Amino acid sequence: MWEKSRRIGATWADAALSTLDAASANGSDTYYVSTNREATLDYIESIAFWAKSYQLAASAVEQIILKDEDEDVLAFRVRFASGYKVVALSSRPSNFRGKQGNVVIDECAFLQNLDECRKAAMALLMWGGQIRFISTHNGVKNPFNQLCLDIRSGKQKYYLQTTTLKDAIADGLYQRISLVTGTQWTLEGEFAFVTGLYEDYGIGADEELGCVPLDVVGGGLVFNRDWFEIIDVIPSHFDAQVRFWDLAATTGKKSYYTAGIRLAKSGDLYYVTDVIADKLGPVAGDDLMVETMMLDGRDIPIRWEMEGGSDGLKYEAYMQTKMAGYDAKAVRPSGDKLTRAKPIAGEAKAGRVKIIKSHWNNMFLDAVHGFDGQPRPLINDITDALSGAHAHIVSTQPINFGIANRRNRYDNSYGGMAGNWRDHL
């Protein structure tokens, strides 16, 4: 199983594997299916490309006609001197009958009959072979996502490979693009490339590029994405700010996110000024907190949820050492996740929460819109960070007692300076 970002060359790379396998004396046939005729033709042309690149003896791309339930079905084929072949055909389950070898089911989250194709392909494994599922995600309720979840839980014994756009960029994707297109690689150009892709994909960016299936159907139970206004300019001065972290980490089969939200308040309005969320192990999550702290600067306090027992105290002491010189503390949460989210949800519903325009907008909006208190990666991690940030700011802001009481408070506080109380409001 390969859950992947779009446009990273996954199908092209799989064609390289199928070519080598079909050309080997101890290889096998490979049968490729996808969502449409154009995709199958692209795959078989990639087979021909790799055969030429490897200098392997192979036929040209052939068009063949297969009989399928009294219908003539067009398929594409490349034959090798080894006697094996690669065939690209339609996704009809009956196409696998009587065949033997490997099966590649591409963009399988978009097939109408994935479960049937999978069952039909399983019969090929009796005599050896392999099934490779390759796809971007298409919603949390999709059979492809369910297979991924079953693998993570141990119900299925498949191998699961995850490749996000960020993973591919780290492995040199943009450097390769620069080489092929004849442009000079720069770090700035790479950043602009990634940012541009996220902006182009809009609401679907995290699903299409980040391997995070969307779950917005039935959302809006606590937050609604329409409550948050995206703005280009934020105030030059804030009454309070905080960077709050939810420190869920990816460990073993559990795939949660380290999420940090920077929230600010000016007057009666709140501003979400930055959102970070990444699948990281515990050590990498700590490093991300320290790196972000240095970028934010010393004026912004850092807070995170304290775990129960002595471990939480030990971790707080450990992180305070790493963050020496900064205002960094753990806080104990009060109430369940849903209870903690309601106050900031009320502010958002009243139109008092703005978000600065940035590449993370859709990730943030999808997460809070899908939040309902149930345990779900990314959605809960981001929402918990937002709730914690709001709770911290509320706890540090003075209570508005009204103008008369405020005057009495300042009179009492400043004694002989009471006559100048307006200067202190």
Image (tube, rainbow, N blue to C red):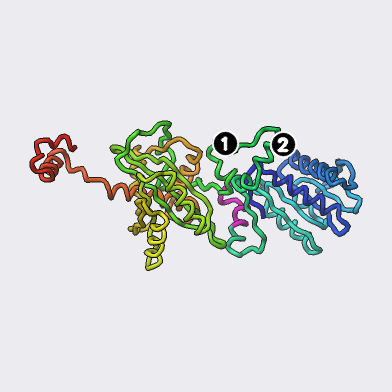
- Mark 2, other Cα within 10 Å: few <14 / some 14–19 / many ≥20: few
Front position in the image: 86 or 170: 170
**Closer to the camera: disc 1 or disc 2?**
1
First to last magenta residue range: 138-148
| Residue 69 drawn at (x, y percent) | 81, 48
Front position in the image: 179 or 321: 321
- Disc 2 marks which residue? 180
- 224 vs 239, left or right, is right
| Residue 418 drawn at (x, y percent) | 10, 39
Vertical arrangement, residue 255 with respect to residue 10, above or below: below
| Residue 242 drawn at (x, y percent) | 36, 46
* Residue 311 occupies quadrant: bottom left
Q: Secondary structure at mark 1?
A: helix
Q: Residue at left 14%, top 42%? A: 410
Residue 53 highlighted magenta (yes or no)? no
Q: Residue at left 32%, top 38%? A: 238
Front position in the image: 227 or 314: 314
* Residue 317 occupies quadrant: bottom left
| Residue 338 drawn at (x, y percent) | 38, 54
Q: Are marks 1 and 2 in contact (CB under 8 Å)?
A: no
Vertical arrangement, residue 169 with respect to residue 257, above or below: above
* Residue situated furthest bottom in the rendering: 310
Q: Secondary structure at mark 2?
A: helix
**In terms of sequence position, does the residue under pointer 1 or pointer 2 come before the other?**
2
Decide if residue 72 is in sight here. Answer: no
Residue type at tag 1: Glu
- Disc 1 marks which residue? 188
Decide if residue 292 is in sight here. Answer: yes
- 37 vs 318, left or right, is right
